[in-house]
Amino acid sequence: MVPFGGWDMPVQYAGVLAEHKAVRTAAGLFDISHMARISVGGADALAFLERLFTNSVAGMKSDQVRYGLVCNEAGGILDDILVYRWPYGFSVVVNASNRPKILAWFEQQRVGKKVDISDMTTETTMIAVQGPDAVKFCEGLFDVDVSTLKYYFAKPALYCRNPSIVSRTGYTGEDGIEAIVPNELGQSLWEELIGRGAIPCGLGARDTLRLEAAMPLYGHELSETINPIQAGLGWAVKFDKDFIGKAAIQTASPGTVRVGLELEGKRAAREGSPIILDGSPIGTVTSGSYAPWVEKSIAMGYVPAANSAVGTKLGIDLRGSVVPATVVPLPFYKRKK
């Protein structure tokens, strides 16, 4: 167990390798209750979120879930979040470490507006089932047919006759279901899913899985000094509307950009390792690991845009020895649909 974003979290249960492969081949089970869950309602809720969110909120269908960023005036990323649109309002899922910051930002931005904000994090449990068998393992647990849920859609549901939420979302690169249930039912849901064959997974496997899928992690690939375009998240930014940080993002120079790197051999590049070109550092690794499923040493990091083309030969300084690396397309792994 380790401290993580104000919570005590498991690094592993049976081991990172076994857990990683369980998610790729069957289904893994994650307690993700550390992710902040915030309800946003009121007459001005739509306009409020539209201004704070880089992606479109107005264009969302009812029960749809959408990924995007919350930025400061300088275009730096305050957090990457999920917005859920309901017939009666909105929900937002925020990274654990950014919960106080985003709640404070929401409070600051809602002044003078008819917006109600409720932090539901400590009142509910959030559990993710991820992998090709995830939907099958969840069938019959809720009063909605989870197999009919489209990707990045959610439904209010009943679990043991109690109001809950199920969504077809995740952070592993696999198909999956994420469920939010009352705290008193969290353990029973967890144990039911283990009984159906889901394998408990910790932070270690969650990190190697999201790395293979090239999903950015706040504090690594994302920060207040990085804008969404640098991070390769331009698809989640809609410049045909107004949002905080828009002007700064539009006028920013390319600078450094996020790339995928494949290293020779099995040594893992760690966060902070210098990325080398012609003997000189030009960038920094933000995440790296030997990836269990693709069976390669992979990393993500930031390099100048001029050196970011796929196929570019670079090196990574691993404690004084430079290991050859090549810029490769992202993601490193993509599931077969």
Image: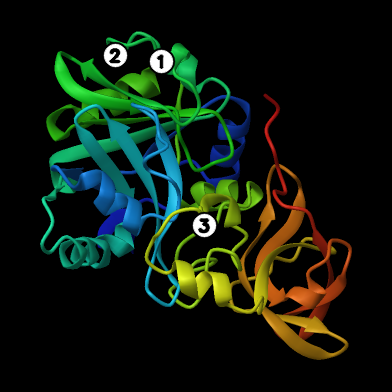
User: In x, y percent, where is residue 18?
Assistant: 58, 39
Q: Quadrant of the C terminus?
A: top right
CA gap, disc 2 and disc 1: 8 Å
Q: Is residue 251 left or right of residue 82?
A: right
Q: Which residue is mark 3?
A: 239
Q: Which residue is mark 1?
A: 146
Q: Which mark is residue 91?
A: none
Residue extending farthest to the bottom is 280
Q: Position of residue 316 (x, y in %)?
A: 76, 77
Decide if residue 118 is on the left or right side of residue 287: left
Query: What secondary structure is found at the residue carrying circle 2?
Result: loop
**Residue for point 61% across, 68% down:** 230
As drawn, the label of residue 142 is 2
Residue at mark 3 to residue at mark 2: CA–CA distance = 39 Å
Q: Nearer the viewer, residue 253 or 131?
A: 253
Q: At x 59% / y 57%, what residue is drawn? A: 234
Considering only vertical position in the picture, is 202 above or below 28? below
Residue 318 shows in the view: no
Based on the displayed image, in which of its 4 quarters is residue 333 positioned?
top right
